[in-house]
Image: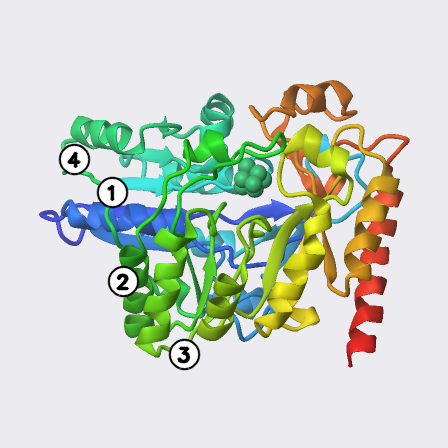
């Protein structure tokens, strides 16, 4: 059945959150935050809105065919998947490759229900572009008249590759509002698009939603893309974010909220702390999470106490390394010696050791396994969990050129090999086997700490 138009007077904007192709995927609050913000802007400009979330783990048809993925009560968990043949660029990696998300035929079915006037596709990691390809191709095949626009992280970091690989009609890599308005004008569609203070409320965020207060980060670490993607740090508005949380909670009953901020605690007295006070006053019973680490530098007792009071279930610190030289060379964050003091503050505020963890960056160009091992042992000795965060080379970041030079993978030509799961910067001083050992070490020390605490 070919798609039909149901209401010619009000244009339809279709937003697609693509499936993910990877060696492993755990949905740690992977929600369409930016897409829903954009959708609200289109709605305000006079469009009807439709969302296809390809990571919808509740999709009935996909569950029937692929099984029910194991989920947690906080809205995170596994995703239904199909194992597929590895693309040529990843053939040498001895791991199973999968497509995560709802069935392709379900995406096509939803695309075919009604002809949209414009289709907007988001993109995440550069190495996830196969999912973007899939939905752009399906959109073109099903709705050939509608312009297909790709935006998001991959589109911003590699706009030319995105245009070439996905075949999208337009790739928006900067000046989002100006670019989208110009495209709408060209197609005779409503074009008064402006950033809105709220987001489009979609049922896909019923179990868990993501929010953000501040934009960007005041730091400029060699291994990060925050500045390229978000520009200079901009303090957010506590009232606006509280209004979003309150609206989502009221309309959907959502209780779990994860912060997407790169620098949640920066300027905290004028933003995050005000937000926490509003939540405390509201008496809403919510749970908050931190998939991105928070800065040790800005963490103090007052913030810890309020976070505990309003329902933060965990603290994840961006620690990266116990080696002073690492920080002198790459990020100028706080001295590693400050971690112990911050853990004491967190515990004084009521967080248990099991609720506190620190991210350790592994697999940077030229990094030795021993440095990562020392960092894991350092963090574990302090009684908290060490979480390994594998390095992914990011186009345009300060370490990008060195990464291209040092890697045995063709980073400049093929974004699939930016995938942190394959350890793109593996070398004799830090092999893939070493990475597995480091993960085992972190796991075993965490279990030992937990059993001691119990
Ligand atoms: S502190 Fe974190 S978010 Fe900020 S630039 Fe460094 S890695 Fe990126």
Distance in Å between CA atoms under marks 1 and 3 = 29 Å
Q: Which residue is mark 3?
A: 285
Q: Is residue 306 above or below residue 358?
A: below
Tell whether circle 3 marks a residue whose Cβ is less than 8 angstroms from ligand 1: no
Q: Which element is circle 3 on?
A: loop
Disc 2 crowd rating (10 Å Cα; few below 14, some 14-19, many 20+) is some
Which label sits on residue 195?
A: 1
Residue contact between numbered discs 2 and 1, judged by CB atoms under 8 Å:
no
Q: Which residue is mark 4?
A: 191
Q: Which element is circle 4 on?
A: loop
Comes first in the chain, label 2 or label 1:
1
Comes first in the chain, label 2 or label 4:
4
Comes first in the chain, label 3 or label 2:
2
Distance in Å between CA atoms under marks 4 and 3 = 39 Å
Closest to the camera, between mark 4 and mark 1, is 1
Image coordinates for residue 388, horizontal then vertical, percent: 73, 50
Image coordinates for residue 57, horizontal then vertical, percent: 51, 64
Distance in Å between CA atoms under marks 4 and 1 = 12 Å
């Amino acid at each position: 059945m070919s798609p039909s138009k149901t209401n010619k007077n009000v244009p339809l904007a279709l937003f697609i959150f693509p499936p993910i192709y990877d060696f492993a995927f755990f949905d740690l609050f992977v929600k369409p935050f930016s897409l829903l913000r954009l959708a609200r802007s289109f709605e305000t400009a006079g469009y009807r809105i439709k969302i296809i979330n390809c990571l919808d783990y509740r999709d009935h048809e996909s569950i029937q065919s692929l099984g029910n993925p194991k989920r947690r009560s906080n809205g995170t968990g596994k995703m239904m998947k199909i194992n597929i043949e590895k693309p040529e660029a990843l053939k040498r990696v001895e791991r199973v490759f999968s497509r995560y998300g709802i069935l392709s035929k379900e995406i096509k079915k939803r695309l075919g229900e009604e002809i949209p006037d414009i289709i907007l596709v988001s993109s995440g990691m550069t190495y996830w572009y196969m999912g973007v390809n899939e939905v752009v191709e399906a959109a073109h095949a099903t709705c050939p008249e509608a312009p297909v626009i790709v935006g998001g992280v991959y589109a911003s970091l590699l706009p030319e590759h995105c245009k070439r690989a996905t075949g999208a009609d337009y790739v928006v890599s900067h000046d989002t509002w100006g670019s989208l308005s110009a495209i709408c004008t060209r197609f005779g569609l409503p074009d008064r698009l402006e950033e809105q203070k709220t987001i489009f409320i979609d049922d896909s965020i019923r179990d868990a939603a993501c929010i953000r207060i501040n934009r960007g980060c005041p730091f400029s670490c060699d291994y990060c893309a925050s500045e390229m993607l978000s520009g200079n740090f901009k303090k957010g508005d506590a009232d606006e974010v509280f209004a979003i949380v309150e609206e989502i909670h009221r309309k959907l009953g959502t209780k779990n909220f994860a912060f997407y901020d790169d620098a949640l605690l920066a300027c905290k007295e004028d933003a995050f702390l005000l937000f926490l006070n509003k939540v405390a006053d509201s008496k809403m019973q919510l749970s908050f999470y931190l998939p991105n680490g928070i800065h040790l530098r800005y963490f103090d007792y007052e913030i810890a106490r309020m976070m505990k009071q309003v329902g933060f279930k965990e603290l994840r610190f961006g620690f990266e390394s116990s080696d002073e030289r690492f920080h002198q060379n790459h990020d100028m964050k706080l001295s590693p010696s400050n971690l112990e003091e911050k853990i004491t503050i967190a515990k004084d505020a009521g967080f248990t050791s099991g609720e506190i963890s620190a991210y350790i960056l592994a697999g940077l160009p030229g990094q030795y396994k021993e440095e990562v091992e020392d960092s894991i042992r350092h963090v574990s000795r302090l009684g908290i969990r060490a979480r390994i965060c594998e390095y992914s080379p990011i186009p345009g970041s300060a370490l990008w050129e060195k990464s291209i030079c040092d890697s045995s993978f063709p980073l400049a030509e093929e974004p699939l090999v930016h995938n942190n799961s394959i350890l793109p910067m593996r070398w004799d001083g830090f092999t893939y086997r070493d990475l597995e050992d480091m993960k085992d070490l972190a796991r075993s020390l965490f279990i030992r700490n937990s059993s001691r605490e119990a």
